[in-house]
Image (spheres, rainbow, N blue to C red):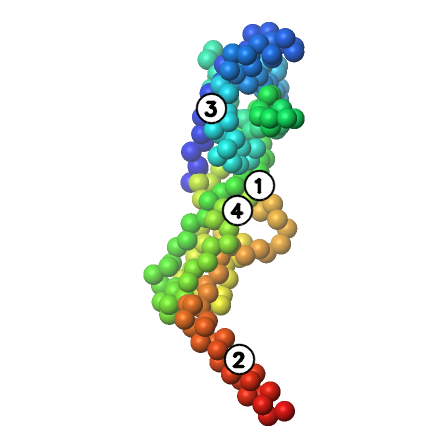
Amino acid sequence: MATEIPDLEAQERTGTGKGAARQARRDGMVPGVVYGGDKDPLPIQIPFNALVKRLRAGRFKSTLFNLKVEGHDDVRVICRDVQRDVVKDLPIHIDLMRLHRNSKVNLFIPVQFDGEDSCPGLRKGGVLTVVRPEVELVVTAGNIPSRITVDLSRLDIGDSATISMVDLPEGAQPTIDRDFVIATISAPSGLQADTEEGEEAVEEEAASEE
C-alpha cells in the first residue's frame, strides 16, 4: 500500500557562501542545502524551471521526495523552507531535510471511495459530494499509504462519511483533532427543490392562518 515517492533531481554545488549562491542563480539554478540524518550538510542546486514547476503544482512542502544527486546515495527528503525574492516572489534558496524510515512526516493522502454500487443513498438518486479529496495525515516515512479508502455502502441520503469511519494505516493519524467530514450523500437537486417548495407552501399557509 506504499505510495510511489517522486524523484527530485539536484546537483552537488561547489563552493558555499553568497558568492557561490549568486553564481548558481546566474547559471539558472536555485541553490540549496540538504541537512539532517546524522550526516554533514550537502550544498546542492536545482534547475530553476524544474523547481518552479514543482512549486506551482502545489503541496511542495508536504511532499516526500526521493532526492537524487550524482555521486551520492538516494535519500528521502522533505522541504523545510523555500526562500523567495521579496519583489519577484521567485525561489532563491531551498532547504531540504533528510528523513529516516521511522521519521514522522505530514503528507496529503488521496481518498478513494468504495461501495458506490451498493450505497443506499446513491441508489436512490443521491449525489456524492466530496469535501476532502485528500486528507492530511501524520505518517512514517517508511510506510506511506498510496490512499485511504472510504466505504460508502451503508450511507443514505443526508449521511456523511467522516474520518472516524476510515481504517487508517498503522502508525498514521490525522493532523486535525476532530471528526471531520470527508464526503456527504446529498439529495438530488430535483428532490431538494421539491422539498424547499413544500416548506415554502407550508410557511405561506401558516402565515395566512394567522
- Along the polypeptide, which appears first: circle 4 or circle 2? 4
Cα gap from disc 1 to disc 2, whole angstroms: 47 Å
Q: Position of residue 54 (x, y in %)?
A: 49, 29
Q: Is there a contact, CB below 8 Å, between mark 3 and mark 4?
A: no
* Quadrant of the frame with the C terminus: bottom right
Horizontally, residue 133 falls left or right of residue 23, namely left
Label 3, secondary structure: give it: helix
What's the amino acid at mark 3? Ala
Q: Nearer the viewer, mark 2 or mark 3?
A: 2
According to the image, label 4 marks what residue? Answer: 135
Q: Nearer the viewer, mark 1 or mark 4?
A: 4
Q: Position of residue 30 (x, y in %)?
A: 55, 18
According to the image, label 2 marks what residue? Answer: 200
According to the image, label 3 marks what residue? Answer: 50
Q: Quadrant of residue 194?
A: bottom left
Residue at image location 51% in from the left, 27% down from the top:
52
